[in-house]
Image: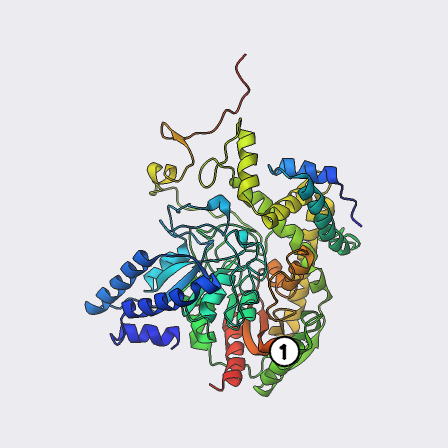
Amino acid sequence: MSDLTRDEVAHVARLARLRLTESELDLFTSQLAQVLDHAADMGSLDLVDVEPTAHPFGLINVVRDDVVRPSLSHDAVLAMAPDVEDGRFAVPRIMGEAP
Amino acid sequence: MSARELAEAVRRGERTAQSLLEASLRAIDERNDELHVFLHVDEPGARAAARLVDDRVARGEDPGRLAGVPIALKDNLCQTGVPTTCSSRILEGWRPPYSATVIDRLIGAGAVPVGKTNLDEFAMGSSTETSAFGPTRNPLDPTRVPGGSSGGSAASVAAGMTPLALGSDTGGSIRQPAALCGIVGVKPTYGMVSRYGLIAFASSLDQIGPFAADVADAALLLEVIAGHDPMDSTSLPEPAPDLLAHLDDGVAGRRVGLVRELLDGADPEIVAAVERATGVLRDAGATVVELSIPELRLGLSAYYLIAPAEASSNLARYDGVRYGLRVDGDDVTAMNEATRTAGFGAEVKRRIMLGTYALSAGYYDAYYGQALKVRTQMIEAFRRAYQRVDLLIGATTPSVAFPFGSKTNDPMAMYLSDVFTIPTNLAGEAALSLPFGRGEADLPIGVQLLGPGRSEPLLFAAARVLERVERGS
């Protein structure tokens, strides 16, 4: 069995900006452990000398001529934002209260 | 009538695009409440597009190879001004400010997009049961799933709502629902079809592809959407392949590998169908060998680390700042958390967490790193196989369409329904599923043909050999 713990799942949820209920924590811990157990078949392989593949054909830089092209208008982009102020995306405070 | 015949009739002025659209809208109206295929039907947009096609014919112009053909779009494809949700609450109400390249090309060829189809949330699932807006029902047996994640698009074609549809395939999401709904579905070579405007799930695996009722219609649709696009840096640097021109090339002299691992655990009727299909190819002049590719058994494990890892990164953008849902919080982190917690369903959360874990310090090498090396081994195993044979054959799915709820409480059981389709995505290669025979409860069986990158002309020709025998035409 995978040694995935409930605390680790809670930590991962914080990293992923998700809040889980107590019962979700229990359920996800057992379900994720099941998937990781299935992945244990890879852990036993000796792959030390195998190169990893992150992309099927190997990514190479693709460049285009450095010419100005039209892009989406400011208004079109902001039109779908949940909150806008002075032509910018507005968000709740980022820093703590001023002293 | 096929999409090809409909388009020809419109180009010759014998049918109008508007009459084809009205027939499509009637078919949708008749069964959409029951089957829940479309999340959004864009009647005004479709009517305007159909009118444009008819106007062009009236002026003596050629509207294109898909003139007037109604087409359904999976709801993870962006279309300017048309609601695009990925079947997720987090994008409910969002209207993209731009269109996917494939949609521009469809419209350029005279096709008429009628609406957006249901999918598993963010394409994560194999049954449409993870859609935040409820599942789609299989038109052939509404007590069963249509497959997924592109279940709505497959159901639209199977129910006769549209002659064509587009889906996306990250681990089988076109081929599996095509098999379960009894139609043709294609996962093209990675990079053959532009991903610009396809909402990302796992970027190194995602590929857009066609659904159609027959092989030639699928070939025509792929020819229209394929070809280099400067807006996608992973797009192959070449034009669309000629598929229809080679459709009747046959398989004489070709070598076909029947892959043991692509039958392991499949229903006996499905194994029998694949063996019967192999016999048809042999009768048509192909040489058949039985192959074992043990590396394919590791595909599922590698995929369920790689795809969630990429998804956890791609879905970080849903933070309540620039578009989509926002749930208020005292500070920006609380807002991010509240938004994502309310906006994502359980399966999406499960995969984001799995991916975040696989990428986290201390586990990266053991999980994600190891999975990337298995991916290399899979690519090399396929390469060795393709030194011996020209294409591979196996089952698309282990079972026919399954009943609702039968796998929803057991993620691993659901993941296993993609066991035969995943290796192609990991290798970036091409595969298609076509209906061949019937299994349990008289439901359709999908036979899968697989080939190396850019082997589509051969895959379609082989599929046509099978189809001709199966249909008698």
Between B390 and B441, the residue placed more toward the observer is: B441
Q: Residue furthest left?
A: B59
Against B347, residue B333 (above or below) is above
Residue A1: give x, y in percent of width and height: 80, 50
Residue B280: give x, y in percent of width and height: 59, 84
Residue B276: give x, y in percent of width and height: 62, 83
Against A92, residue B152 (above or below) is below
- Regarding residue B91, the answer to whether it shows in the image is yes
Q: Quadrant of residue B266?
A: bottom right
Residue B35: give x, y in percent of width and height: 48, 64
**SS for dot 1:** helix
* Residue underneath mark 1: B274
Between B4 and A27, the residue placed more toward the observer is: A27
Disc 1 chain ID: B
Between B376 and B19, the residue placed more toward the observer is: B19
Residue drawn at (61%, 50%) of the image:
B347
Against B373, residue B387 (above or below) is below
